[in-house]
Amino acid sequence: MNIDIITIFPDMVGAILGESIMKRAAESGQVNFRVVNLRDFTHDTHRTTDDRPYGGGPGMVMKPEPIFEAVESLRGDNTTVILTTPQGERFSQPAAGELTGHSHLVFICGHYEGVDERVREALVDREFSIGDYVLTNGVLPAAVIADAVVRLIPGVLGGEGATDEESFGEGLLEYPHYTRPPEFRGMKVPEVLSSGDHGRIARWRREQAEARTRERRPDLWERYDRLRRDGRE
Ligand SMILES: C[S@@+](CC[C@H](N)C(=O)[O-])C[C@H]1O[C@@H](n2cnc3c(N)ncnc32)[C@H](O)[C@@H]1O
């Protein structure tokens, strides 16, 4: 998979995607990250990427010309252009899974008040928000989305099954995890986990995952419970 990130803060991206599992995925050729400096597509001495908003008001708006040039220089036959924006579709685990089926993602990272609307109208295939809050620029959202997508590419996490049971995979939050020691400051690991009885362990984990989801995320629980009931009918 090819992932291009267009930003005026190229150094921010390297710091995030140049470590740990993302770094390994890039080194092994499972993903190819390219960080594109938007200022390389400007033609004035100040390398201007923003301007005042028409109609007045506070802040600055990112100009369309460099963004169009940058995207057009990167776009191939199978490119999906993603705009990071608090106004987009809420990014989710199912969306991450769906994006793994795309071979080339280009992220546009906004800054200031956001990007000129003509970018959205003419260039963008998908718009994603990473949550109902406003960040200063789109690098973190692009990196969040890229990380969630790349770790789902088969082989990136090593153990192929590692993502099967985790939170949101089946519409539930994941069960709790424990490791050694068996007792720490008076807190014991649940007995069932060292019983060696795989059936009991699986049942316990399922019950924990369901209880957690019911308690912490009634929205997820309602959907899961409805699907489960429909499945039984
Ligand atoms: C300060 S924000 C602009 C917010 C915009 N004025 C609005 O009210 O919708 C600057 C940039 O950060 C990114 N951004 C901020 N919050 C985001 C979020 N929750 N999800 C995705 N991108 C976000 C976008 O790229 C956005 O263009």
Image (cartoon, rainbow, N blue to C red):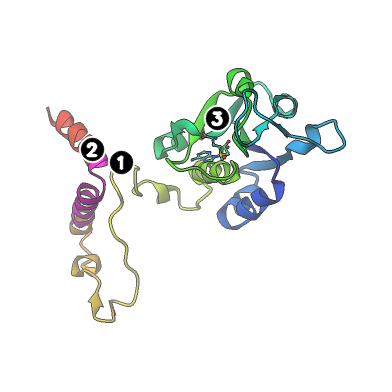
Crowd around label 3: few <14 · some 14–19 · many ≥20 (10 Å): some
Crowd around label 1: few <14 · some 14–19 · many ≥20 (10 Å): few
What residue is rendered at 28% in x and 81% in y?
185
Left or right, 215 with respect to 17, comes to left
Left or right, 165 with respect to 150, comes to left
> Mark 1, mark 2: which one is toward the viewer?
2
Give the answer, above or below, for where 184 lies relative to 74: below
Judged from the image, the secondary structure of the residue bearing numbered disc 2 is helix
Q: Is residue 27 visible?
A: no
Crowd around label 2: few <14 · some 14–19 · many ≥20 (10 Å): some
Q: Is 203 part of what is drawn in magenta? A: yes
Q: Is residue 44 visible?
A: yes
Ligand 1 closer than 8 Å to label 2 CB: no
Q: Earlier in the sequence, mark 2 or mark 3?
A: 3
What label sits on residue 170 in the rendered view?
A: 1
Tell me the quarter of the image containing the N terminus. top right
* Circle 3: residue type: His
Q: Nearer the viewer, residue 70 or 99?
A: 70
Residue at mark 2: 224
Give the answer, above or below, for where 193 lies relative to 146: below
Q: Nearer the viewer, residue 169 or 123?
A: 123
* Circle 2: residue type: Tyr
Circles 1 and 2 in contact, beta carbons < 8 Å: yes
Q: Position of residue 101 (x, y in %)?
A: 51, 31
Q: Earlier in the sequence, mark 1 or mark 3?
A: 3
Which residues make up the magenta segment?
Answer: 202-220
Residue at mark 3: 102
Q: Residue furthest left?
A: 233
